[in-house]
């Protein structure tokens, strides 16, 4: 059975005990409503550390006033069952009051331009909230390694930069996106989708695969790739919030003629859910 901690001090004490016994500690930060995507992070964590901590915390700081904080799915009993099945050692599930005893933090990690491109355009303050809570989790758990999904590519880039800029002694590992059989990236927010929306949502990845196929058969025009994805989405009745073709490390727009690795990222509203996905071109 996983040990459950609800206060930063008890969590830190346990993690320090593990370190005292020369065990590496891996951290998987989540917002709960756990699924097999999260579990891929857990499995990878277990390959890199002797002890794995999963945090479950729906962080108010990263939700905008019009976003889904109040209805974000919370399934703590199912989560704990799944974590036990996967042999997780500790779960950190603090209340909002434990994490922010003085009220919403006045100290926040800002990320300049990285936080204002892609999803940052429509979610002002989101990545500042993410980076702030991740910095807090790193101070609380003091992990040797922390794992993040490539589904949230911008988040992964931001966390790597946070760690480099602020000298956190944490190794960051990105884990490939886990998908449903129809290609849809698994997400806690997929619960908001009706069955019809679910099959429509699969066209996000289909459009991205189309971009990869075009790239592999020699297309190098950035706009051509971008337009192809946007057209393919609108054929499925999806109007994208954005389709962007960027450098996967800096998130800056790719040159007009693509060279080297390129990330194609999309965000779109499908039914009641805002979904994101991405694909890497030129991986070989
Ligand atoms: P969340 O609970 O949605 O904040 O996600 C917690 C972590 O799990 C983040 O690092 C996500 O990128 C990662 N994650 C969520 N869904 C998937 C997925 N389908 N495949 C891989 N990682 C995922």
Image (cartoon, rainbow, N blue to C red):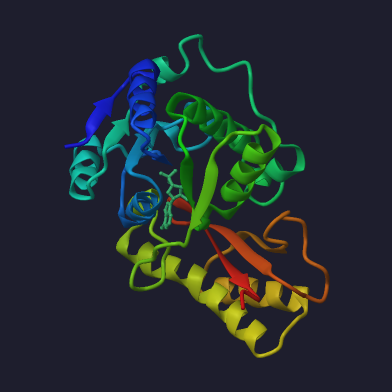
227 or 118, which lies in front? Answer: 118
Q: Is residue 225 above or below residue 52?
A: below
Q: Please identify the quadrant where the C terminus is shown.
A: bottom right
Where 216 falls versus 149 (above or below)?
A: below
Quadrant position of residue 235: bottom right
Residue 64 seen in the figure: no
- Expressed as whole percent of the image width and height from the top left, the position of residue 198 reads 37, 64
Residue 201 visible in image: yes
Image side of residue 219 versus residue 232, left or right: right
Give residue 84's position: percent from left, percent from top: 19, 43
Residue 257 on image: x %, y %: 82, 76
Q: Residue at image x 34%, y 37%?
A: 53
**Position in image of residue 40 (x %, y %):** 36, 56
Pick out the residue farthest to the bottom: 217
Residue at image position (37%, 27%) is 20
Where does the N terminus fall, quadrant-wise? top left
Q: Residue furthest right?
A: 256
């Amino acid at each position: 059975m996983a040990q459950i901690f609800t206060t930063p001090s008890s969590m830190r004490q346990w993690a320090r005990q593990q370190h005292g016994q020369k065990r590496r500690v891996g951290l998987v930060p989540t917002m709960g409503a756990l699924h097999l995507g999260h579990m891929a992070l857990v499995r990878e964590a277990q390959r890199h550390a002797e002890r794995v901590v999963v945090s479950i915390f729906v962080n108010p700081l990263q939700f905008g006033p019009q976003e889904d904080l109040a209805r974000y799915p919370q399934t703590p009993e199912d989560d704990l069952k799944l974590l036990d099945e996967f042999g997780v050692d500790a779960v950190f599930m603090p209340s909002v009051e434990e994490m922010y005893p003085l009220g919403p933090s006045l100290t926040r990690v800002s990320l300049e331009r990285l936080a204002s491109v892609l999803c940052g355009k429509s979610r002002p303050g989101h990545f500042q909230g993410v980076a702030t809570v991740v910095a807090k989790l790193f101070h609380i758990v003091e992990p040797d390694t922390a794992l993040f999904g490539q589904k949230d590519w911008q988040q992964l880039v931001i966390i790597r930069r946070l760690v480099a800029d602020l000298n956190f002694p944490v190794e960051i590992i990105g884990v490939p996106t886990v998908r449903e059989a129809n290609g849809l990236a698994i997400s806690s927010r997929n619960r908001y989708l009706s069955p019809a929306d679910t099959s429509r949502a699969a066209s996000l990845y289909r459009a991205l695969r189309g971009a990869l196929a075009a790239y592999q058969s020699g297309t190098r025009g950035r706009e051509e790739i971008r337009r192809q994805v946007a057209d393919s989405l609108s054929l499925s009745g999806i109007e994208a919030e954005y389709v962007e073709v960027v450098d996967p490390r800096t998130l800056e727009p790719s040159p007009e003629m693509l060279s080297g690795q390129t990330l194609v990222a999309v965000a779109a509203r499908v039914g009641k859910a805002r979904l994101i996905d991405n694909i890497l071109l030129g991986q070989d």
